[in-house]
């Protein structure tokens, strides 16, 4: 057996991590979490690898990591340690526009600097691990590829979000909208790629979520089956775009027509994105993952008080299909004044003008049917903010002029659509747009893009699509209710999602029909209402039209009163792909939402999470006939305390939603 020499990385008060140097290569290091339940084992030798141990059980077997440079050097192979630096951190992060006001940040860390102007930072949390490369080389480097392996110990089941809608035959051009396939790791389709995050079922209620964050000026990571390991994944990255052309639907995309033979290039020393594995012991823990808030770069906006989250009356999903008016509904000034009146009456903070408000691809010129100044003046008089839709390419080419012009006119934000890429150039653009928008106090909602940590760094980016949201039911029969109760455990853990809930036409499985002009949802009315509590979205859409919302007044008022950012979030009960019950707190009030898949079920909501005192509860439940008419619901009011327990009944694809007002 090789003789080991072990010494503490910390002084006596910080003995939670150790580095053990062998008398000969390889060098082995052990980094433990603060509670010592998670161990990150690092080996430095001919290859650089890491392994993850939880409570004595191997979760991830040794997995190689490296950066292959264009000049042939491999950062990580035959590495020679120059220095190590250890840290132990236990602090609290004050979050901006998040589902919690404060986030605990408690970890042990070792920074290993290697000869050759590079190194790796490793972190061990009580609920997972993270690592990132960094380069100190002046003048930058060109990265041909990155090796990021995740070799699981066994052939576990996994929820795999395949790239199933590649554009132009390029797997790296996708809207990031996918239904999950639950398969064994060994069954992974090697002709496709998986979008992160990806969830692995470790058995005995334990799960592992593979994700990334702080994705600044670097391509996104996808996963494929690691052919060199029995049950592993390997990172795959889009190459840097060299040539691009306009194409796609209505020429709104900027497609890559030729790629380089490298994935990224840098011009100065920098840190690279975090590779993360989050570990949960229950599905309640899984849905309460704060890794992005812990790891992403801090806010670069010194005073974020101008950033106002809220709800948005949306026009596109309902096809501008208002009625009982004396003008022709459509993309025109009278229609948007009608939307503004609705938003003002219900306390909805914003109205968005979606596709069609500007002329052709000229973002600086509005349609002949739109008097934008009149709309903005009218909205201001009603205390409603206006947001504008823009295709990424249309905005990116004139962003300086557009932000200056429309900020001066009073526009509050932009919904930027059709990214459909996350190569280095696209990710750099996301950050550049966010920085410029912040200078003009402009809010952003990114579509065709998944969250990457930018929402913490530039908190004016309030939401992202990158989710197979409600728009898909306009043209497809995708199986949405099971997806609805899978998202909170996987996609939502990387950041907020613009699912766009709020349908007032609701259908059972048997009665559902796709419809563009009169779209409906799958599942019950209260299923839609509960999404406003369960789904994280600081900028949250109301997808249906104002006419129908006015007809459904009590449901609409409940939605309008539900906050989009909260002080505290507690997942009360959960089972991936089956159901979830979430409670959120804002000031003295609490909000609870429950969702189920196509299975009807009975659940018990224990109100012990409420502080002492009496609460007036407004409760919306599935109606007794909701399994036949999905619009059926029951509203009631009750006086309750934290000593009470409520038995709730959820119809197939049903929901339950409640507001608790402190008396």
Image (spheres, rainbow, N blue to C red):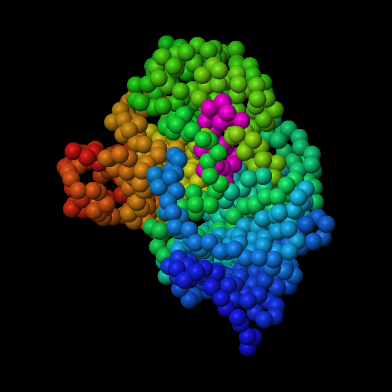
Relative to 490, is 655 on the left or the right? left
In the foreground, 417 or 105: 105
Rendered position, 26 above or below 169? below
Depth check: 89 or 455 in front? 89
Name the residue furthest front: 11
What is the quadrant of the N terminus in the image? bottom right
Q: Is residue 121 above or below residue 429?
A: below
* Magenta part of the chain: 436-459
Would you say residue 79 is visible in this rendering? yes
Which is more toward the observer, 389 or 595? 389
Front-most of residues 266 and 506: 266
**Where on the picture, by quarter, is residue 13?**
bottom left
Q: Position of residue 326 (x, y in %)?
A: 42, 11
Residue at 70% x, 28% y is 397
- Pinpoint residue 392: horizontal percent, then vertical percent: 64, 32
Does any portion of residue 491 appear in the rendered image?
no
């Amino acid at each position: 057996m090789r003789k080991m020499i072990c010494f503490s990385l910390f002084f006596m008060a910080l003995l939670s991590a150790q580095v053990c140097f062998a008398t000969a290569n390889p060098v082995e290091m052990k980094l433990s979490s603060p509670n010592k339940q998670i161990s990150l084992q690092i080996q430095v030798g001919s290859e650089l690898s890491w392994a993850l141990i939880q409570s004595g059980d191997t979760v991830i077997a040794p997995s190689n990591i490296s950066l292959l440079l264009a000049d042939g050097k491999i950062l990580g192979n035959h590495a020679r340690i120059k220095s190590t630096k250890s840290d132990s951190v236990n602090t609290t992060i004050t979050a901006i526009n998040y589902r919690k006001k404060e986030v605990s940040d408690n970890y042990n860390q070792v920074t290993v600097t290697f000869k050759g102007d590079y190194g790796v930072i490793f972190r061990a949390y009580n609920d997972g691990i993270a690592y990132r490369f960094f380069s100190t080389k002046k003048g930058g480097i060109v990265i041909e590829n990155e090796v990021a392996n995740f070799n699981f110990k066994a052939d576990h089941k996994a929820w795999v979000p395949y790239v199933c809608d590649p554009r132009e035959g390029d797997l790296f051009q996708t809207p990031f909208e996918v239904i999950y396939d639950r398969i064994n790791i060994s069954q992974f389709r090697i002709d496709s790629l998986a979008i992160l995050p990806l969830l692995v079922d470790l058995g005995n209620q334990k799960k592992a979520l593979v994700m990334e964050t702080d994705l600044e000026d670097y391509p996104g990571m996808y996963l494929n089956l690691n052919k060199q390991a029995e049950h592993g994944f390997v990172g795959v990255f889009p190459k840097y775009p060299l040539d691009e052309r306009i194409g796609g639907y209505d020429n709104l995309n900027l497609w890559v027509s030729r790629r380089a033979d490298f994935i990224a290039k840098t011009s100065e020393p920098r840190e690279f994105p975090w590779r993360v594995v989050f570990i949960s012991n229950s599905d309640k823990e899984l849905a309460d993952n704060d890794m992005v808030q812990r790891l992403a770069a801090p806010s670069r906006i010194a005073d974020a008080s101008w950033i106002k989250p809220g709800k948005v009356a949306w026009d596109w999903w309902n096809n501008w299909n208002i009625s009982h008016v004396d003008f022709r509904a459509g993309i025109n000034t009278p229609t948007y004044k009608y939307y503004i009146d609705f938003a003002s009456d219900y306390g909805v903070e914003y109205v968005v003008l979606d596709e069609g408000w500007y002329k052709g691809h000229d973002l600086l010129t509005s349609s002949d049917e739109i008097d934008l100044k009149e709309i903005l003046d009218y909205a201001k008089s009603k205390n409603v903010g206006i947001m504008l839709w823009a295709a990424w390419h249309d905005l990116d080419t004139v962003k300086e002029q557009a932000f200056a012009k429309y900020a001066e006119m009073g526009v509050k934000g932009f919904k930027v659509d059709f990214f459909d890429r996350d190569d280095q150039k696209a990710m750099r653009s996301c950050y550049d747009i966010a920085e410029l928008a912040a200078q003009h106090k402009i809010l952003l909602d990114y579509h065709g893009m998944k969250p990457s940590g930018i929402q913490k760094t530039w908190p004016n980016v309030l939401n992202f699509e990158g989710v197979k949201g409600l728009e898909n039911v306009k043209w497809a029969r995708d199986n949405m209710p099971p997806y609805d109760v899978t998202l909170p455990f996987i996609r939502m853990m990387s950041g907020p999602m613009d699912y766009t809930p709020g349908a007032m036409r609701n259908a059972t499985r048997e009665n559902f029909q796709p419809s563009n002009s009169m779209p409906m949802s799958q599942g019950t009315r209260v299923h839609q209402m509960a999404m406003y509590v369960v789904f994280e979205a600081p900028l949250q859409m109301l997808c249906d039209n104002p006419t129908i919302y006015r007809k459904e007044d009590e449901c609409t008022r409940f939605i309008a009163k539900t906050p989009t950012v909260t002080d505290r979030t507690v997942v009360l009960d959960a089972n991936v792909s089956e159901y979830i019950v979430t409670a959120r707190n804002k000031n003295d009030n609490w909000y609870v939402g429950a969702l189920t898949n196509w299975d009807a079920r009975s659940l018990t909501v224990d109100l012990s999470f409420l502080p002492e005192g009496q609460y007036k509860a407004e409760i919306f439940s599935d109606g007794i006939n909701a399994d036949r008419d999905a619009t059926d619901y029951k509203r009631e009011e009750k006086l309750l305390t934290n000593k009470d327990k409520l038995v709730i009944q959820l119809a197939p694809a049903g929901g339950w939603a409640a507001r608790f007002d402190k008396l």
